[in-house]
Image (cartoon, rainbow, N blue to C red):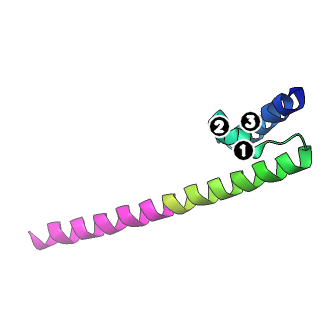
């Protein structure tokens, strides 16, 4: 139990270093009593999480640019 608590603290710090905050229920799925397994799980999760965030940012930027172009074209047409 103490080993899992310590590993959870370490995993939470690793995620915090990546600016990721997750609920305890999800953290418990990543943490084991084995340091290498926990590190691999946390690193893998952080990588996938950050990739997903970046993908969503790009999609949002593209969407905003598309909307702005359409709005600009509409405004230009109404002159």
Quadrant position of the C terminus in the picture: bottom left
- The extreme front residue here reads 1
- The extreme left residue here reads 79
Residue 73 magenta: yes
As drawn, is 64 to the left or to the right of 40? Answer: left
Q: CA distance from mark 2 to mark 1?
A: 7 Å
Q: Residues within 10 Å of mark 1 (few under 14, many from 20)?
A: few
Q: Which residue is mark 3?
A: 12
Q: Secondary structure at mark 2?
A: helix
Range of residues picked out in magenta: 58-79
Query: Which one is in front, 69 or 13?
Result: 13
Residue 27, placed above or below residue 55: above
Are the two marked residues, 2 and 1, in contact with CB atoms closer than 8 angstroms?
yes
Q: Residue at x 85, y 30 (%)?
A: 6
Q: Residue at x 89, y 31 (%)?
A: 3
- The disc at residue 25 is 2
Q: Which residue is mark 1?
A: 29
Quarter location, residue 29 = top right
Q: Is residue 69 visible?
A: yes
Q: CA distance from mark 1 to mark 3?
A: 12 Å
């Amino acid at each position: 139990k103490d080993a899992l608590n310590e590993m959870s603290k370490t995993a939470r710090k690793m995620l915090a270093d990546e600016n990721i905050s997750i609920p305890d229920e999800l953290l418990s799925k990543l943490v084991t009593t084995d340091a290498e397994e926990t590190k691999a799980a946390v690193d893998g999760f952080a990588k996938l999480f950050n990739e997903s965030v970046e993908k969503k940012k790009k999609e949002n930027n593209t969407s905003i640019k598309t909307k702005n172009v359409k709005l600009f074209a509409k405004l230009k047409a109404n002159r």
